[in-house]
Image: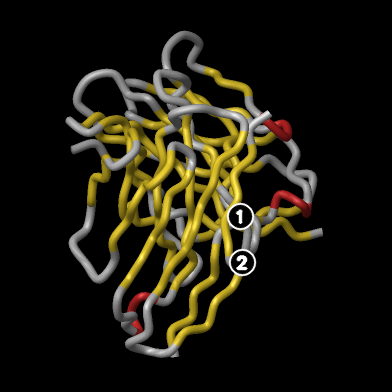
Amino acid sequence: SQTIHQWPATLVQPVGSPLSLECTVEGTSNPNLYWYRQAAGRGLQLLFYSVGIGQISSEVPQNLSASRPQDRQFILSSKKLLLSDSGFYLCAWRPAGGPLEQYFGPGTRLTVT
Amino acid sequence: AQSVAQPEDQVNVAEGNPLTVKCTYSVSGNPYLFWYVQYPNRGLQFLLKYITGDNLVKGSYGFEAEFNKSQTSFHLKKPSALVSDSALYFCAVREVSAAGNKLTFGGGTRVLVKP
């Protein structure tokens, strides 16, 4: 069966520091991968999605970037964090060419101080 | 662009009573609709989807949803709510772009089931 991992689970970082969040999926090949941010325990904002290695689509121009160095690895980064980057970051996957529903990881709680 | 709206920020219901969480959609073409649930500090869990076929869709944990084309709605329902159903619920719609499929989510509805 497929499993999605995210780490770290929680992170507290000062303003201006770099960020790297990692997401990996097990038990599938060539998944579609997604990064979302959820602020204040409410709506989801799609940040990036990827249909293959090195292929990244950006939804919202901002202080963040994403990379997909391996088939089942998706990384969210920032060079300098802002206070407004605080939130709950969720990674999701779906099988390429398969059902349309996405499956979510456990999330990373980021607090920028 | 496709969109979904959840008109209620919060729904309060007594345990054992029917639960309904509302969702309306705006799409061009055939709608592909989804419901997810999120418990505190957890990722979203997929409940059910409507792609085509029967207007009443059954999903996980006793939930079902009714697709109504004339009212452009896709309301989530449970005949008898449990305290453990207290959570944040999201409706979503599929969007197709040049880069692939993605989901657009509603703003979420918080459900509180009181004992």
Q: Which residue is mark 2?
A: A9
Kindly check if marks 1 and 2 are in contact, taking CB atoms under 8 A apart as contact: yes
On the picture, is B93 further left or further right than B16? left
**Residue for point 40% across, 55% down:** A36
The percent position of residue B75, horizontal first and vertical second, equals: 49, 35
The percent position of residue A19, horizontal first and vertical second, equals: 41, 73
Marks 1 and 2 sit apart, C-alpha to C-alpha, by 8 Å
**With respect to residue A80, does A56 lie above or below?**
above
| Nearer to the camera, A71 or A48 | A71
Residue B110 - label = none
Q: Secondary structure at mark 2?
A: loop
**Residue for point 62% across, 22% down:** B58
**With respect to residue B109, does A53 lie above or below?**
above
**Can you say which quadrant of the picture contains the C terminus of chain A?**
bottom left
The percent position of residue B92, horizontal first and vertical second, equals: 41, 39
Q: Which residue is mark 1?
A: A106
Q: Report the residue that reaches farthest toward the front.
A: A69
Q: Report the residue that reaches farthest toward the right.
A: B115
| Nearer to the camera, B9 or B37 | B37
Counting residues from the N terminus, which is met first, the one under dot 1 or under dot 2?
2
**Residue density around tag 1, few if under 14, some if 14–19, many if 20 or more, within 10 Å:** many
| Nearer to the camera, A109 or A44 | A109
Colour convention: secondary structure
**Residue density around tag 2, few if under 14, some if 14–19, many if 20 or more, within 10 Å:** some
**Residue for point 43% across, 29% down:** A30
**Residue for point 42% across, 77% down:** A86
Looking at the rendering, which quadrant does residue B110 occupy? Answer: bottom right
**Amino acid type, residue under disc 1 in the picture:** Pro
**Amino acid type, residue under disc 2 in the picture:** Ala
The percent position of residue A84, horizontal first and vertical second, equals: 33, 79
